Image (tube, rainbow, N blue to C red):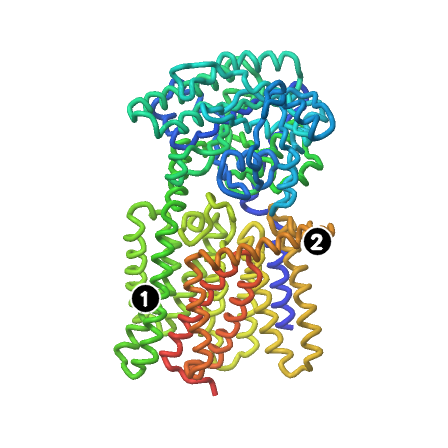
Amino acid sequence: MKRLKVTLLILFLVHSIVFLPSAREVKGIDMEQDPVDKHVIVLLVPGLSFEELDMITEQTNYPYMWKKGAYGAVNLRPDGNYSYLNNAVSIGTGKRALGISDWNAYNKDEKVNDTTVDNLMLQWYGTLPVASVLHPHVNLLINKNLKSSFQPVVGWFGESLQEKGVFTYVMGNSDTRDEKVRYASLLTMDRKGEANGDLQKGVVDNIYAPSGMSMEPSLIKENIKHIHSQNDKTFVVVEWGDFYRLFQEEPNMLNDHFQKVYKDTFQRLEETIYQLLSETGGEIWLLSPAVNSVAYKNKNQLGPLWVWHENRDEKGLLYSETTRRYSLLSNTDIAITWDNIFLGPSENRNYTVGYPIKYLDDESIVDQWSLTGFQQRIKEITYVFDKRGAVLSSYVSSLVVMLIVVSLMIWLLKDSRKWKKVAQILLLSGILSPLLFLITSPWINAISPFLYVAAIFLGSLGLAALLKVSFRQSYSIACFLFFSALTVDIITGSYFIQRSFLSYDPVIGARYYGIGNEFAGIYLVSGLLMIAPLLKEEGKTLTKWLQLFVVIMGMILVLGLASLGANAGASISASIIMIYISIQLLLKDAKWRVKFIIAAGIPLLMLGFLYILQMAQPSSHIFTAFQKLFSGDFVTIWQTIERKIQMNWKIFKISYWTQLFVTSYFFIGIVLWRRQREQLHSSQLFLINCCIIGSLALLVLNDSGIVAAATSMFITLSVCYGWSIEGEGKKV
């Protein structure tokens, strides 16, 4: 009867967590309006970065303008190298994409190699194009991307709008004195490489401007007003190329003169926005597809976005289901958002991996509107991205050195009580260091990276010494502290996780929410190792194992729920540990045939359980993967697997974590072979084995499995060393 009550209680808790709405679920409306008389103007400004937008509070001529609308930062990462072309293709397709050499757009009457572009396309494709802006290399661009990692479809967005009666138009360029640069039309062209527009409109000769040309605000405004007067639904893209031209010539300019032109260029952009806000209707999007070279070198690589709704006096906040954050967006969200504005939810969602951006104008939400706070958050993100390499390299190298030193102490100074105490403090400090990385994350930019890592280790040593004298089971207590802190943080919104050097980076864009692989590996093994004191207690065998199962089930939920950890690999790894424990406890003496059948069947049940966890949860990459699986899209599934393998191999070759991975796995192998294994209590040895299995599962199942395997095995090895030094005997 008692077992039944416990079972029912666990099932009730699982049901409550899975099917209650997420506490962080965002209520709002997609950026979709009545399609009658609908206009969207996109000012595409290559070279614009948040360093220029800092001028809003210092040198603006229109402060009121910047106190309305909604701001955001866009991850612009393409499939290949960061560049204006690759980024523009990615924005237009809704997936990470690639450009090709010699790509450009041309007005119909322009010539390429002494042949007009329309005749060139007639010669190459067999039909004479009718549009005014042409892309002669469209076939090469389509084929290259269909063979790339994410297989984006070039031209679907522009073609979709044209088929639904939306008039699309592109004007302007980023031409320099040396080359033609016209990439904005990637947002409006169809699959045949045709688009409406005029790439010279809005651009005037100006002998004082970089490359002798500049954008003219009044011409841009008048052209757009004319387009609006002739069409009910329009999507107009202006390639505002003055910042691009300026930074192309910056190395040749006197600094004082550059600063003057820099300020003039920003004020001309402001004037363009102001005139459009004052004399046109519809939405206005200010978007940078690529930051300038100076900002890029400063690691300030997120692209600015500002959206003014049809109500010019309205404030709003942008929310992305891709990133699960306010004001932090993905380039994969942009095209599907524009598509939804005109067409509403449609089958075009299949072309992209992003989600329509929500424009939230509820008063309780808009109260969070703070440009100063947003700018400060961008600086924090940029700082972590900039200093991440220096911090991780010094931290990981220190952990490797510590493991080597402690190993030598154990083997060469095994009879010295003094050195054993030193080794224990070092091990305990290593176990505690991830906790310090987590809880100190809001203050990371207060000191230099070197001093920060030094402070982490000094703090870890001090806390380790305190735990060692205060608690007999100090290693389990250290694991418990980290496990508890991370659990509380992930449940309450991941404030600390999102700011830590050991977490995911929104500039890199591999993950935006949940628990990253660095912390996931530590979390998984810490949850097991913290309950070692409970398993060592005499008697109450059933209670002990129930406690273990409850902890593992809790980890599966926290790691697997889309609204919490959203880490499928770590959640399945926890499930594999549960399978191993179940076999050891219940089927140890069963025949191998029975074990094989159960071992094959339980993973399928666990996958089913992971799918159930995604129900009534926010959309996530996990749920998307299940949708592909159930729809029979095994090609995409296999491509995802290939991408994960390639990612692991890339990380193995270049990552700092490879040092820790190799070192930890090497020493754990020696531990299992040498006598340290014999000095462990039977329950400790059992948990160490569970951790090793979990670490191996993380290695195989995660896209950056080497990272998760390295962190998990480091904690496992450190605790194993600590327990063996304590020399506790095996349970009789």
Classed neighbour count for the residue bearing mark 1: other residues with Cα under 10 Å, few (<14), some (14–19), many (≥20)? many
User: Is 365 rendered above or below residue 571?
Assistant: above
Q: Identify the residue shown where x is 45% and y is 68%.
A: 530
Please give left or right for residue 277 compared with residue 63 in the image.
Answer: right
Which mark is nearer the camera, 1 or 2? 2
Residue wearing tag 1:
464
Query: Sequence order check: which comes first, mark 1 or mark 2?
Result: 1
User: Is 556 rendered above or below residue 161?
Assistant: below
Residue 628 in view in this figure: yes
Q: Identify the residue shown where x is 69% and y is 72%.
A: 598
Kind of residue sitting beneath label 1: Ala
Position in image of residue 338 (x %, y %):
61, 30
Q: Count the numbered circles shown.
A: 2
Label 2 sits on a secondary structure element that is helix
**What residue occupies the far front of the structure in this picture?**
114
Please give left or right for residue 227 compared with residue 46 in the image.
Answer: right
Residue wearing tag 2:
634
Q: How far apart are the two marked residues, 1 and 2, measured between alpha carbons?
A: 49 Å
For the N terminus, the quadrant is bottom right
Residue 651 got which mark? none
Classed neighbour count for the residue bearing mark 2: other residues with Cα under 10 Å, few (<14), some (14–19), many (≥20)? few
Position in image of residue 444 (x %, y %):
34, 48
Q: Quadrant of residue 593?
A: bottom right
Q: Quadrant of residue 382?
A: top left
Observer-nearest of 289 and 584: 289
Observer-nearest of 595 and 23: 595
Position in image of residue 246 (x %, y %):
40, 25
